[in-house]
Image (cartoon, grey):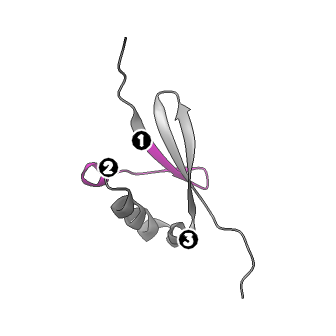
Amino acid sequence: MQIDQLTRAYRYDGIDLPVPPHLAEDRTALRAYHATLYPAILNAEMVDGGVVGGVHVTEYRRAVGTKG
């Protein structure tokens, strides 16, 4: 049996976002940090993109709908 350590990657609109080491384990704080770069992330849905090339990918997807 072999145990592999996966790194995490966060993507928004096809862009890989930075993950500061001090926020890597706190998803709420990391989302707030990413929202400073792209404010729409606050309303975006977090979707598990699976494991791609040894990296666990999480994508922020914009909420689509009507205003009002």
Along the horizontal axis of the image, is 3 left or right of 13?
left
Q: Is residue 24 above or below residue 56?
A: below
The residue indicated by pointer 3 is 43
Determine whether the residue tagged by mark 3 lies in a helix, strand or loop. Answer: helix
Labels 2 and 3: the sequence-earlier one: 2
Q: Tell whether label 2 touches label 1 (CB within 8 Å).
A: yes
Q: Is residue 20 above or below residue 37?
A: above
Q: Residue 1 is drawn in which quadrant? A: top left
Determine whether the residue tagged by mark 1 lies in a helix, strand or loop. Answer: strand
- In the image, farthest residue toward the top: 1
Is residue 63 a member of the stretch shown in magenta? no
Q: How many labels were placed on the picture?
A: 3
Is residue 20 a member of the stretch shown in magenta? yes
Along the horizontal axis of the image, is 64 left or right of 13?
right
Q: Which portion, as a residue range, is magenta?
A: 9-24
Determine whether the residue tagged by mark 2 lies in a helix, strand or loop. Answer: loop
From the top left corner, tell me how far across and down residue 34 is, in percent.
Answer: 43, 62
Q: Is residue 12 above or below residue 43?
A: above
> What amino acid type should be assigned to the residue bearing mark 2?
Ala
The residue indicated by pointer 2 is 24
Along the horizontal axis of the image, is 4 left or right of 42?
left
The residue indicated by pointer 1 is 8
